Image (cartoon, coloured by chain):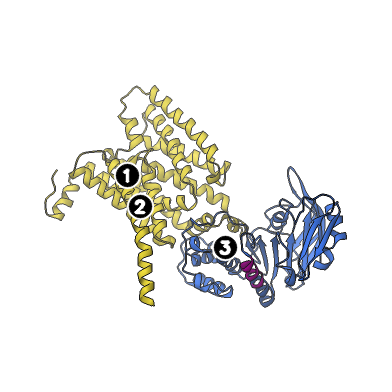
Chain colours: A blue, B yellow
């Protein structure tokens, strides 16, 4: 596996879907080392499907995708993944340190006897400013605190590519901002690459190197200022769309004729 | 049997009859196993699947009785096949309640058919449904021990992967862990544990050993190993105390005592501990200031 070249993810004419149909088609893009990339699009557009392709959990229907210049494969240790959680909630009375430890050594058979996983877990938790949460139960953590733990869980094995699936959903504005800044500082300080799925691009805009916009079965990629234009999104959606900017640089995407307003 | 004031004599008295010895031996093994496996059942939110497995086992046990075979073998066969099928057909068993419920109702029906075909007396049926810990033979104890050792060995090997995939299946899958296989292993563990636990509490009362102690322990401890130890302790205490009370006290069914004791622990933790804990934390905070 060659990790020296800057290309971390490269897709050519990539088509994704399931046995019952195509989700999106003909996507070509590259993501380079150290880039912070947002994946934006309406519900069901196929954003998580892209993650599944990168993780090797699903095969492309067409085209080609390479991760670290190789075919995607399950269990790639260079990838840290934060899925949308459903299993961990207010009923999960487990210390957060235990979860991060398991993310480090959970693949090993038998019972843990060395303290290596504990040290690694504490280090990862410190990196995301969650050392104070180490001995608290997952069941009592707030949404923002949980996302920090999940980020530590993804970082503990020292990945070079982070996949974050909607970490901002259910966070209030302040925690949304905190988490985006945290991810950005991880990306910059460790020179890792982050792909982050979100509904609202605005909290991410100041930090992004690239946007992958998925809608209407198509994928548009580029720098934010290239993708988030009325022309580019009109072409993507196939209906007239206007991108509005406010005085602080926030964008709003509105349909001009059909008023059902996607994000 | 009356209690003396001498604890040692009382304890010796408990072991005087072989039926009590067998009951204590098998009960101890079952409590340890149920406490451990139950922890994963609760963590994976598969208590309904565990409940269903015991009902599937009922059909197996009733079938075995019909063919004059030891009911434990019928239980092992049916729960083993049923558990694997559940794991294969619905990997996230907790989310498929309707399918599991449909199968368990059918299996219970099948059990009823086997019982009606069986011409012998109904005490066998009764003991499958509600447990008959005082009827355990020495060969049953050996079988229980063998099953217990196998379960312990398997849990020791799969402990971390099973724990992680129970807690965070999506990440475990992405990390390349064999989550599907672990799901089958887990269901087989539940199947074997259920089969041996039926001797003690019966298919209908299996929750009292397989689910409630683990549910209590997860309220009390946030570290898996501690929680497992608490779960085992509760199951053990309930079994031992249940047997002792039945021996020395009113001779009601042991499984009644066990379920009542477990329920008592549950109430204690649910309503007393939860009220005391915030108070203790409050006092500790006061001290710090």
Q: Residue A13, percent across and down?
A: 83, 56
Q: Are marks 1 and 3 on the same chain?
A: no
Q: In the rendered structure, find residue A143 and report the number of the disc placed on it.
A: 3
What is the quadrant of residue A227 in the picture? bottom right
* Viewer-nearest of discs 1 and 3: 3
Q: Which region of the structure is painted magenta?
A: A173-181
The outermost residue toward the front is: A247
Q: Residue A41, percent across and down?
A: 75, 56
Q: Nearer the viewer, residue A192 or A71?
A: A192
Q: Which residue is mark 2?
A: B32
Image quarter where the N terminus of chain B lies is top left
Q: Is residue B243 a member of the stretch shown in magenta?
A: no
Residue at image coords 46%, 59%: A93
Is label 1 in a helix, a strand or a loop? helix
User: Earlier along the polypeptide chain: callout 1 or callout 2?
Assistant: 2
Q: Residue A196, percent across and down?
A: 69, 63
Q: Which residue is mark 1?
A: B259
Q: Nearer the viewer, residue B147 or B256?
A: B256
Q: Residues within 10 Å of mark 2 (few under 14, many from 20)?
A: many
Q: Is residue B38 visible?
A: yes
Residue at image coords 32%, 42%: B200
């Amino acid at each position: 596996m060659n990790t020296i070249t800057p290309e971390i993810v490269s897709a050519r004419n990539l088509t994704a879907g399931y046995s019952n149909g195509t989700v999106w088609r003909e996507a070509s893009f590259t993501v380079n080392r150290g880039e912070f990339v947002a994946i934006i699009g309406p519900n069901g557009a196929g954003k998580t499907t892209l993650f599944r392709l990168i993780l090797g959990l699903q095969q492309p229907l067409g085209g080609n995708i390479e991760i670290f210049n190789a075919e995607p494969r399950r269990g790639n240790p260079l990838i840290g993944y934060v899925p949308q959680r459903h299993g961990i909630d207010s009923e999960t009375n487990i210390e957060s340190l235990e979860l991060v430890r398991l993310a480090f050594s959970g693949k090993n058979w038998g019972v843990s006897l060395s303290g290596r996983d504990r040290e690694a877990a504490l280090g990862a938790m410190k990196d995301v400013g969650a050392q104070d949460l180490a001995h608290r139960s997952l069941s009592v953590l707030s949404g923002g605190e949980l996302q920090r733990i999940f980020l530590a869980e993804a970082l503990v094995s020292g990945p070079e590519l982070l996949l974050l699936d909607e970490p901002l959903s259910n966070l209030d504005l302040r925690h949304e901002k905190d988490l985006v800044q945290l991810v950005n500082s991880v990306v910059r300080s460790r020179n890792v690459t982050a792909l982050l799925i979100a509904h609202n691009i605005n909290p991410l805009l100041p930090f992004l190197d690239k946007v992958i916009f998925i809608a209407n079965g198509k994928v548009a990629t580029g720098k934010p200022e290239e993708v988030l234009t009325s022309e580019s999104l009109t072409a993507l959606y196939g209906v007239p769309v206007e991108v509005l900017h406010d005085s602080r640089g926030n964008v709003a995407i509105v349909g001009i004729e059909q008023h059902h307003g996607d994000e | 049997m009356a209690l003396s004031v001498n604890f040692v004599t009382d304890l010796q008295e408990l072991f005087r009859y072989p039926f009590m010895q067998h009951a204590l031996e098998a009960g101890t093994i079952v409590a340890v196993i149920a406490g451990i496996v139950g922890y994963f059942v609760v963590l994976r939110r598969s208590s309904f699947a565990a409940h269903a497995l015991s009902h599937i086992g009922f059909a197996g046990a009733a079938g075995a009785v019909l063919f004059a075979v030891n009911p434990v073998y019928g239980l092992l066969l049916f729960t083993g096949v049923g558990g694997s099928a559940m794991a294969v057909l619905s990997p996230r068993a907790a989310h498929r309640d309707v399918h599991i419920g449909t199968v368990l109702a059918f299996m219970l029906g099948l059990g009823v058919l086997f019982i009606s075909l069986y011409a012998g007396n109904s005490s066998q049926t009764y003991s499958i449904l509600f447990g008959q810990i005082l009827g355990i033979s020495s060969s049953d104890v050996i079988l229980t021990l063998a099953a217990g050792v196998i379960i312990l060995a398997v849990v020791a090997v799969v402990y971390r992967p099973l724990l992680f995939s129970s807690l965070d299946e999506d990440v475990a899958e992405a990390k390349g862990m064999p989550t599907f296989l672990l799901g089958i292993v887990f269901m087989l563990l539940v199947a074997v544990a259920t089969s041996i636990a039926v001797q003690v509490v019966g298919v209908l009362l299996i929750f009292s050993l397989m689910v409630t102690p683990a549910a209590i322990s997860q309220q009390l401890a946030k570290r898996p190993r501690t929680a497992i130890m608490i779960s085992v302790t509760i199951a053990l205490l309930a079994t031992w105390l249940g047997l002792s009370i039945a021996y020395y006290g009113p001779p009601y069914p042991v499984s009644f005592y066990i379920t009542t004791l477990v329920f008592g622990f549950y109430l204690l933790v649910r309503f007393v501990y939860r009220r005391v804990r915030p108070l203790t934390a409050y006092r500790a905070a006061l001290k710090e200031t």
